Image (tube, rainbow, N blue to C red):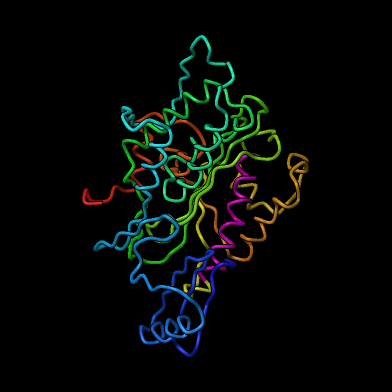
């Protein structure tokens, strides 16, 4: 359950109130009851009714025939302005797989406060920009001691945002069926050899949650890295299923989670512990309970169709555009 979400249910009337500090979203299936609740709130608190949803916490919402588009165009432009890159030339990929070294690439960046300030702002931008999530995650690893090479990577990311500032997430009117994708890049961190994993979850065709994170321990095999990622994704799925239950959208069938590692799938479905898996923490094995209780079902997917691939590693521009086109959209030019 989300602690900032309040639910009011009476007979067949359902109302939902989402509160963050002094910003409130109110919706429900009865306009009469919503207006009555608003009148009661006005009597008790000093507040303004801003009408239909257009902005919440800096996130703009645009209605279209398919549903909504959420974006942070104004916030993205503010980041570009603070970075002093309003006239920069856009690029088509937020992170390069090839590092261009200069004479002073490994010297400390002279303004680490600016680096941290911009990274903190970019972290908030990822609320509607899953396409930059991996790049931001990589840059966050160096906030304590940024070098010139990291600042160059940051400037590339901002140049990408310069050309895609009006990008957002589409929320479609669709069948509310939950599904997820999970992937891990084994031992991809060159400093500590820890793996990076990522997942994304869809409700119908709408992307609703995603994450990129470096695993806490070093995985001894790609199977272990993928299995740990599966366990984390299972925890997210259980939470989402519980939230949807509170929103009166129960998931009657097991939620399908797609993974491209057949060994990890076999390990998740195998109830027998053996020597090759005894070093994996017990808390990861709860995924088996999720499968037995029909909360999730892990299916294999071809690597080329794995959407979570964009959250785990730098990709070629062609591959990057192919995957992100299934996650994000560009609003009309009138935005």
Q: Position of residue 19 (x, y in %)?
A: 51, 68
Q: Position of residue 73 (x, y in %)?
A: 34, 47
The residue drawn where x is 54% and y is 58% is 297
- Counting labels gives 0
Q: Position of residue 17 (x, y in %)?
A: 49, 73
Q: Nearer the viewer, residue 69 or 260?
A: 69
**What secondary structure characterizes most of the magenta part?**
helix
- Please check the rendered image and state whether residue 334 is part of the magenta-colored stretch, yes or no: no
- Which residue occupies the extreme top position in the image? 103
Above or below, 170 relative to 114: below
- Which residue occupies the extreme bottom position in the image? 11
The residue drawn where x is 65% and y is 40% is 215
Q: What residue span does the magenta drawing correspond to?
A: 225-244
The residue drawn where x is 24% and y is 63% is 65
Q: Position of residue 82 (x, y in %)?
A: 43, 36
Above or below, 331 relative to 35: above
Q: Report which quarter residue 26 is drawn in.
A: bottom left
- Which residue occupies the extreme front position in the image? 46
Quick one: quadrant of the N terminus? Answer: bottom right
């Amino acid at each position: 359950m989300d602690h900032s979400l309040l639910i009011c249910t009476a007979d067949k009337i359902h109302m939902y109130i989402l509160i963050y500090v002094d910003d409130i979203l109110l919706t429900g299936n009865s306009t009469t009851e919503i207006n009555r609740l608003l009148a009661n709130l006005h009597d008790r608190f000093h507040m303004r009714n801003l009408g239909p949803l257009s902005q919440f916490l800096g996130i703009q919402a645009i209605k279209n025939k398919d549903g909504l588009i959420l974006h942070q165009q104004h916030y993205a432009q503010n980041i570009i302005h603070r970075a002093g890159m309003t006239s920069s030339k856009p690029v088509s990929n937020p992170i390069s797989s090839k590092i261009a070294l200069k004479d002073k690439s490994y010297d400390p960046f002279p303004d680490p406060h600016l680096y941290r300030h911009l990274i903190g702002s970019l972290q908030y931008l990822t609320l509607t920009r899953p396409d930059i999530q991996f790049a931001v995650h990589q840059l966050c690893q160096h906030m304590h001691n940024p070098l010139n090479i990291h600042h160059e990577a940051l400037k590339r990311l901002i140049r990408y945002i310069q050309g895609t500032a009006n990008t957002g997430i589409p929320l479609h009117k669709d069948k509310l069926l939950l599904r997820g994708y999970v992937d891990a890049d084994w031992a991809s961190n060159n400093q500590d050899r820890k793996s990076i994993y990522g997942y994304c979850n869809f409700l119908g065709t709408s992307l609703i949650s995603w994450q990129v994170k470096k695993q806490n321990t070093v995985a001894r095999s790609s199977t272990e890295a993928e299995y740990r990622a599966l366990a984390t994704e299972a925890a997210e799925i259980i939470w989402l299923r519980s939230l949807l239950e509170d929103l009166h959208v129960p998931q009657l069938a097991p939620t399908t989670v797609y993974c491209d590692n057949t060994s990890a799938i076999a390990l998740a479905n195998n109830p027998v512990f053996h020597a090759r898996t005894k070093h994996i923490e017990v808390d990861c094995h709860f995924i088996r309970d999720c499968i037995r209780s029909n909360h999730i079902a892990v299916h294999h997917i071809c690597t080329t169709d794995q959407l979570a691939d964009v959250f785990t590693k730098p990709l070629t521009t062609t591959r990057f555009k192919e995957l992100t086109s299934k996650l994000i959209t560009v609003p009309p030019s009138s935005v």
